[in-house]
Image (tube, grey):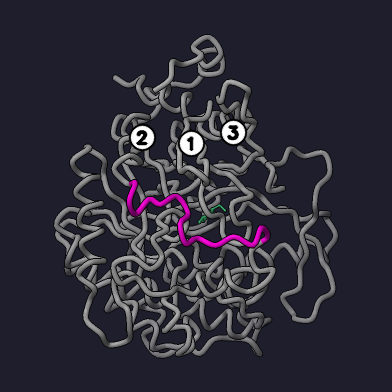
Amino acid sequence: MKTLDRQNLNESLAPLMRTHFPKEFVWGSASSAFQVEGAHDVDGRVASIWDQFAQQPGAIVDGADAKVACDHYHRWPEDLDLMRGLGFDAYRFSIAWPRIFSKLGGSANTKGLDFYDRLLDGVCERGLQPWLTLYHWDLPQYLQAQGGWAARATVDAYLEFADCVSRHLGDRAKHWITHNEPWCTAMHGHYDGIHAPGVRDLKTALQACHHVLLSHGAAVRLIKNNVSNAKVGIALSLHPLHAASESAADQAALQRHDGLRNRWYLDPLHGRGYPRDIWELCAAYAPEVKAQDMQIIATPIDFLGVNYYFPETVYDAPAAHPLRTALVQNADVERTAFGWEVAPQGLADLLKRIKTDYQTAPIYITENGASYEDLVQADGSIDDSERMRFYQRHLRVLRDLIREGVDVQGYFAWTLMDNFEWAQGYRRRFGLCYVDFKTQERRLKKSAYWFQQFLKNHA
Ligand code: IFM
């Protein structure tokens, strides 16, 4: 790896040390299968809803697809070496369901399982701790044709997938995440339609959401049954929220937004059922819930994964359905290239609120990171000082929170390398490593060098 620009890195590093965090704290990087693997038709993989969605004109801003992406399917040894070289302890990755089951009721695809065997062995051989996500948005298209997450039968199909994968990999993988960001699966996928499968209907979204949560609870039980000493959790995208004003209308909008954005997930996972205020408001859109569903969803988890990116400011706005709210684009706040507000303090607000309101299981930050327009210098180096500072500022907040007694046990950077950023295609880069998508060359950005120096400074 290239020599570090020590003076510069040390300057920004001075107040923050790995030794400020608990010794057992887990430092990892996270990815998802569809965003990095490529090899879309290799070894029996079938199409996912994202392969299908990417073909729709206008669905992906740059018209890209993920047929090759970062070619992680073939280049994983190099990528794991990069992770190890940076000093990470853990790798969070997801299993592509379309590689494992190619049709309904069929048997598991051995070649797909073999790939994850190789990857998992490679992770373990390098001393990295594997964290497996079962569902990171790549539903097989054949299941969408049967109704997708809006159909209850998809819960059974997911459990078959979870059963197969946990039996196969559970001897080596002990950390399991059932779903990544169910809010996105439900709302981006089925309400605003900017994600696959591109449905736009609130009732369908809430039904899909219920099935995702139900499949989560059932999978917790199943994985714990299949895997000795398994730690099982879920990764939620959660947001600290503010009202645009003190007005009663904006305050009520804040409650509604919080209800659908945060409480709709946190409440049922903590045995409180769906939030009553929101349930009453959305009576016409409410999901069908069967006896026992809520008990299954509330199956205790071993950890809560929190994906934190940005806070939101809410005001009351007329719209077609009773949950109407709108978001304010605050002027004069710092933003990433994606337009997301940069608010390290929001992480503290969010985690304190979770601790107070839910007395939850230990927390892991399962994603945090930022997209910037990375500047490639004449000498080929990449000066992403903004991303470096983003990480430093969030980690400082996290360090202080842990000192205040909030039980956070690990942190996963999103993400090791630039990849397919869903509807934004390759336009939005989140990586610590720059990927030249023409040559597949990976190059460390300044933020990666900073992380490397930060991680190596431990007792
Ligand atoms: O790239 C995504 C990831 O798949 C889920 N969480 C947010 C990231 C950045 O948008």
Please tell me how many numbered marks the rendered image carries: 3
Q: Find residue 127 and report its image quarter.
A: top left
Q: Is the residue marked by circle 2 packed among few (<14), some (14-19), or many (20+) residues within 10 Å?
A: many
Residue 71 lies in the magenta stretch: yes
Amino acid under disc 3: Arg
Cα separation between marks 1 and 2? 9 Å
Amino acid under disc 2: Leu
Residue 455 lies in the magenta stretch: no
Q: Quadrant of the image for the C terminus? A: top left
Local SS, label 3: helix
Local SS, label 1: strand
Q: Badge 2 is on which residue? A: 82
Q: Badge 3 is on which residue? A: 387
Task: Give the residue at x 36% y 65%.
Answer: 96
CB contact under 8 Å: marks 1 and 3: no
**Nearer to me, 177 or 66:** 66
With respect to residue 370, does 62 lie above or below? below
Q: Quadrant of the image for the N terminus? A: top left
With respect to residue 82, does 53 lie above or below? below
Read off the magenta span: 61-75
Main secondary structure type of the part rendered in magenta: loop
Q: Which of label 1 and label 3 is nearer to you?
A: 1
Residue 290 percent coordinates (x, y): 42, 90
Left or right, 355 with respect to 88, comes to right
Cα separation between marks 3 and 2? 18 Å
